[in-house]
Image (cartoon, grey):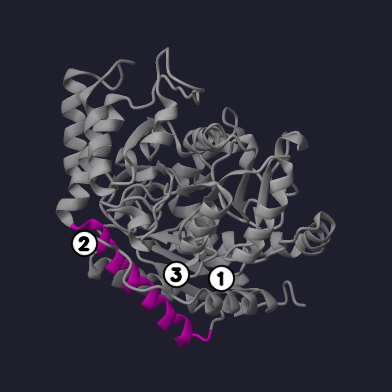
């Protein structure tokens, strides 16, 4: 497969066993002496500008930050410059950027050709008109060229909006009610899918505050990588209005934090066909990252609907969209006089010329530069280097990757699973482990602070995205910095069973 970033597929049973073993151990983390005398010292002495901005921001912004990914222990760092593989903060400190804006910049941050196309458009059209622009057509055709199954594409403002649209389409197309998601997966923050987030089996018990319980009457979650439980849920739903759609992250929940078997998606496809449900691929992270044709090309699976985000706007705002087979995507058609029911979707800034052109240009550049494969090789090099360091220092941490999506689990904070058809059983398991999970989450953030103080930006201290800009030299330097952290890690008495 051309421009594919995944060179290998690790056994999920082996990874899950390693993660289980990790959660059975007491927490391993950087020592108190190193954390207090080196890490906190870095923040206090070399990040004074960031701290001043954060302290004032707390007066005007809830929590002091506008984005969930921005908060880091002991306070968020304020960045002024992004370029390729590097970020630079308000105080002039340089960092290797493995966050890459949460995944959308596989070409590297502030990539020149995309920036130049955006500037040229701003000089003429401006960022938004609310009317038709050729860039909308260009990006739809470009996506279809690489993903032939996406016969029609509607660009929206975010992945969250796109998930909402996909569920609406599925219910109209099938005349059924239920949506099944995989436990632990993230599909945005709309009411219906803030259910079973992060921890399988957590249902509405962790993050679903402010959402009436009845919102989840037509949403179900099943255990990751478990086709038997999925089919059992499909059978149960037959008597309750049927299943309209099954929505999956193709590499596993939370961008592969819970990896799945290589043939899992084909199994889901077969069950969708058997029970008359639409298969919805959430390719917000994987689309144009794991392969130019998305995860659907890598797994050789044809979904009915595909959800886009992240890279679809080339690192610019308003990154989202949903596409698929004409018979389904066409249900979103605007205007009057359409036959049958229409899935109403909107957004004044959706498909704005700036985002559409940036996305089109980015996809063309991903193809030209072979970015998926280059970034995937960097991910392999990073993951393999991390494994060698973990062995060298005798650490129980778990490192693995799906191409340019690299995972480094230091505490196993998200590795618990309370999946069950019984609400009581799930709730009892969750409540019995809740304190331990939060302690492990706190330790994960502590490790994230240590990485940041050593010039490495990660996603919550546990996930790293590589890009076209990550040369062998960049990866090798990053591994040197990780080693400087790992040599200070000790076994604690926290969470000792």
Most prominent secondary structure in the magenta stretch? Answer: helix
State which mark lies toward you, 2 or 1: 2
Q: In which quarter of the image is residue 442?
A: bottom right
Name the quadrant of the N terminus: bottom left
Residue for badge 3: 262
**Residue 459 higher or lower than 61, as above or below:** below
Q: Where is residue 350 in the image (x, y as percent from the top left)?
A: 38, 26
Which disc number belongs to residue 2? Answer: 2
Q: Where is residue 220 in the image (x, y as percent from the top left)?
A: 67, 48
Q: Earlier in the sequence, mark 3 or mark 1?
A: 3
**Closer to the camera, 416 or 152?**
152
- Residue sitting at x 57%, y 79%: 18
- Label 2 to label 1: alpha-carbon separation: 34 Å
Q: Quadrant of residue 235?
A: bottom right
- Label 3 to label 1: alpha-carbon separation: 25 Å
Q: Where is residue 337 in the image (x, y as percent from the top left)?
A: 42, 13
Q: Is residue 118 visible?
A: yes
- Is 380 magenta? The answer is yes
Residue for badge 1: 410
Q: Which of marks 2 and 1 is nearer the N terminus?
A: 2
- Residue sitting at x 50%, y 65%: 264
The range drawn in magenta is 370-394
Left or right of 480 on screen, residue 14: right
Q: What secondary structure is marked by label 3? A: loop
**Residue 4 higher or lower than 235, as above or below:** below
**Closer to the camera, 328 or 190?**
328
- Label 3 to label 2: alpha-carbon separation: 19 Å
């Amino acid at each position: 497969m051309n421009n594919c970033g995944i060179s290998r597929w690790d056994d999920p049973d082996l990874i899950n066993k390693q993660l289980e073993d990790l959660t059975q151990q007491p927490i391993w983390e950087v020592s108190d002496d190193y954390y207090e005398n080196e890490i906190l010292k870095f923040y206090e002495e070399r990040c004074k500008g960031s701290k001043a901005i954060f302290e004032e921001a707390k007066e005007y912004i809830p929590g002091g930050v506008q984005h969930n990914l921005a908060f880091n222990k002991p306070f968020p760092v304020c960045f002024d410059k992004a370029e390729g593989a590097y970020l630079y903060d308000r105080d002039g400190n340089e960092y290797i950027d493995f966050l890459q804006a949460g995944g959308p910049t596989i070409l590297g941050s502030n990539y020149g050709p995309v920036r130049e196309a955006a500037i040229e458009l701003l000089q003429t059209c401006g960022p938004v008109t609310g009317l038709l622009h050729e860039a909308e057509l260009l990006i739809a055709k470009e996506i279809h060229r690489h993903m032939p199954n996406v016969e029609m594409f509607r660009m929206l403002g975010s992945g969250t909006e796109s998930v909402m649209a996909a569920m609406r389409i599925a219910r109209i197309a099938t005349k059924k009610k239920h949506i099944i998601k995989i436990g632990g997966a993230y599909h945005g923050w709309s009411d219906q899918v803030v259910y079973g987030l992060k921890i399988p089996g957590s249902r509405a018990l962790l993050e679903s505050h402010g959402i009436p319980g009845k919102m989840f009457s037509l949403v179900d979650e099943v255990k990751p990588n478990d086709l038997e439980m999925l089919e059992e849920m499909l059978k149960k739903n037959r008597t309750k209005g049927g299943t309209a759609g099954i929505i999956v992250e193709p590499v596993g929940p939370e961008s592969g934090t819970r990896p799945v078997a290589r043939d899992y998606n084909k199994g889901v496809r077969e069950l969708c066909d058997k029970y008359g449900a639409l298969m919805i691929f959430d390719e917000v992270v994987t689309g144009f990252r794991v392969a130019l044709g998305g995860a659907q090309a890598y797994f050789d699976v044809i979904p009915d609907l595909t959800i886009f985000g992240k890279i679809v706007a080339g690192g610019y705002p308003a990154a989202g969209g949903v596409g698929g087979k004409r018979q389904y995507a066409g249900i979103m058609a605007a205007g009057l006089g359409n036959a049958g029911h229409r899935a109403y979707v909107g957004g004044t800034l959706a498909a704005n010329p700036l985002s559409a052109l940036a996305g089109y240009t980015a996809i063309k550049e991903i193809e030209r530069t072979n970015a998926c494969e280059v970034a995937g090789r960097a991910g392999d090099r990073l993951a393999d280097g991390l494994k060698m360091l973990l062995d060298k220092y005798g650490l129980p941490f778990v490192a693995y990757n799906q191409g340019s999506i690299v995972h480094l689990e230091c505490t196993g904070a998200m590795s618990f699973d309370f999946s069950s058809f019984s609400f009581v059983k799930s709730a009892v398991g969750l409540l019995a482990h809740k304190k331990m999970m939060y302690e492990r989450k706190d330790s994960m953030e502590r490790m994230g602070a240590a990485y940041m103080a050593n010039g490495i930006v990660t996603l919550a201290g546990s996930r790293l995205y590589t890009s076209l800009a990550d040369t062998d030299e960049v990866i090798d330097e990053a591994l040197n910095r990780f080693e400087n952290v790992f040599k200070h890690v000790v076994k604690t008495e926290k969470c000792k069973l």
